[in-house]
Image (cartoon, grey):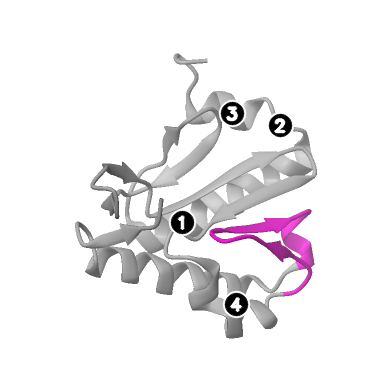
């Protein structure tokens, strides 16, 4: 898995999931200006930011990212879904956790709303790089 590339991850998807991944990759590239990189096992990420846990532990994460799987998309909002609650109400069919938006298909959501959420998240993380605090 360590030698896997973004292209390998997308190539392993079924046609519908690969199509959704291509749309998200284009969208995230336009927002970030960054090329996609592979984070962890199959997360496609754009840009990076530095964070600190309250315990003092530090790390780096992608500013924008998603994990594509057959019939499932996880979009990461590293600044937290709570910051985007109003926009998420207008997004369409999805569920959330603390930092994830879960979709079955991009056709279930309003892409204009999604782009606004992703732009806001990216900008927030860019403005707070190095000063983001996470709770352990």
Describe residue 123's horizontal placement relative to residue 118 as left or right: left
Distance Cα–Cα, label 2 vs label 3:
7 Å
Q: CA distance from mark 1 to mark 3?
A: 16 Å
**Dot placed on the residue nearer the N-terminal end, 4 or 3:** 3
Residue 103 lies in the magenta-colored region? yes
Considering only order in the chain, which callout, 3 or 1, is on the residue closer to the N terminus? 3
- Residue for point 30% across, 60% down: 133
Mark 2 = which residue? 13
Badges 1 and 3: C-beta atoms under 8 Å apart?
Answer: no
**What whole-number distance in Å separates the C-alpha atoms at marks 4 and 2?**
25 Å
Identify the residue position indicated by label 1 in the image. 28
Q: CA distance from mark 4 to mark 3?
A: 26 Å
The x, y position of residue 70, in whole percent, is 77, 38
Q: Which residue is mark 3?
A: 9
Percent position of residue 62, x then y: 38, 47
Q: Please, is residue 31 above or below residue 53 in the view?
A: below
Q: Residue tagged by mark 4?
A: 113
Task: Look at the image and give the residue range highlighted in magenta.
Answer: 92-108
């Amino acid at each position: 898995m360590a030698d896997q590339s973004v292209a390998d991850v997308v190539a392993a998807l079924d046609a519908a999931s690969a199509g959704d991944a291509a749309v998200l990759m284009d969208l995230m590239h336009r927002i970030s200006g960054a090329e996609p990189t592979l984070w962890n096992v199959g997360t496609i990420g754009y840009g990076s930011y530095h964070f600190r846990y309250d315990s003092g532990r530090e790390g780096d994460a992608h500013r924008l990212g998603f994990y594509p799987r057959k019939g499932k998309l996880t979009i990461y909002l590293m600044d937290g879904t709570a910051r985007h609650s109003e926009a998420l109400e207008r997004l369409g069919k999805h569920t959330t956790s603390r930092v994830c938006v879960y979709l079955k298909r991009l056709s279930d959501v309003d892409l204009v709303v999604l782009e606004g959420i992703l732009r806001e998240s990216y900008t927030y993380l860019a403005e707070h790089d190095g000063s983001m605090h996470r709770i352990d």
